[in-house]
Image (cartoon, rainbow, N blue to C red):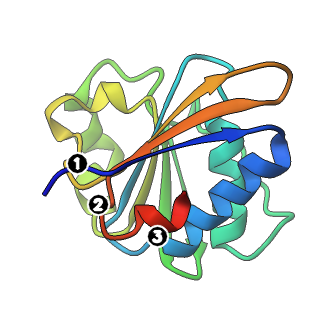
């Protein structure tokens, strides 16, 4: 099945939050959501908004997992595991982080390039690119049965 692609311009943080909430509404156990983009592109901002929407808690404390590498959250969809692979040496280290077990739940991954061969083929990929100010461009690909609702 060919992968569908949607391109969105997110003019501000509220639009980024709205996209994250729309993704959270459609996420289900077994899903992988991969956040790509350079430093400062908004990956952690989108991840925080996703987790707050999925947990139905706008005040949820969502620290960046840059140093812990993974943080887990209980949400209305079940557990969500937020991985930040920036500091990861490569996919071999994922076993120590519980990657295989986490895949039964929802995984939200920053820096998915470091997954190597473990990158899920059925993932939703959100490639972010900073524009002016808080604006960013988002290219979403994957989830052919659900991506149309994210356009």
Report the Cα–Cα distance between label 3 and label 1: 15 Å
Is 100 on the left or on the right of 20, as rendered?
left
Determine which residue is flagged by label 3: 27
61 is higher (above) or lower (below) than 116: below
Q: Which mark is residue 37?
A: none
Q: Quadrant of the C terminus?
A: bottom right
Q: Quadrant of the N terminus?
A: bottom left
Q: Check contact, mark 1 vs mark 2: CB within 8 A.
A: yes
Question: First in sequence: mark 3 or mark 1?
Answer: 3
Would you call the spot at circle 1 few (<14 residues within 10 Å), some (14-19), or many (20 or more)? some
Look at the numbered disc 2 and give the secondary structure of its residue: loop
- Residue at 83 percent across and 29 percent down: it is 134
Q: Quadrant of residue 85?
A: top left
Determine which residue is flagged by label 1: 120
Is 69 on the left or on the right of 94, as rendered?
right
Determine which residue is flagged by label 2: 103
Is 31 on the left or on the right of 134, as rendered?
left
């Amino acid at each position: 099945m060919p992968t569908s692609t949607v391109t969105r311009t997110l003019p501000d943080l509220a639009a980024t939050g709205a996209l994250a909430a729309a993704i959270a509404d459609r996420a289900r156990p077994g899903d992988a959501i991969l956040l790509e983009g350079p430093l400062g592109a908004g990956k952690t901002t989108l991840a925080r908004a996703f987790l707050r929407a999925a947990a139905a808690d706008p005040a949820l404390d969502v620290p960046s997992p840059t140093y812990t590498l993974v943080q887990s959250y209980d949400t209305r969809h079940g557990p969500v595991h937020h991985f930040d692979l920036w500091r990861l040496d490569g996919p071999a280290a994922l076993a120590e982080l519980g990657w295989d077990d986490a895949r039964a739940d929802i995984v939200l991954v920053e820096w998915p390039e470091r997954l190597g061969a473990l990158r899920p083929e059925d993932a939703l990929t959100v490639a972010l690119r900073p524009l002016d100010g808080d604006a960013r461009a988002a290219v979403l690909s994957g989830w052919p049965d659900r991506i149309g609702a994210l356009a």
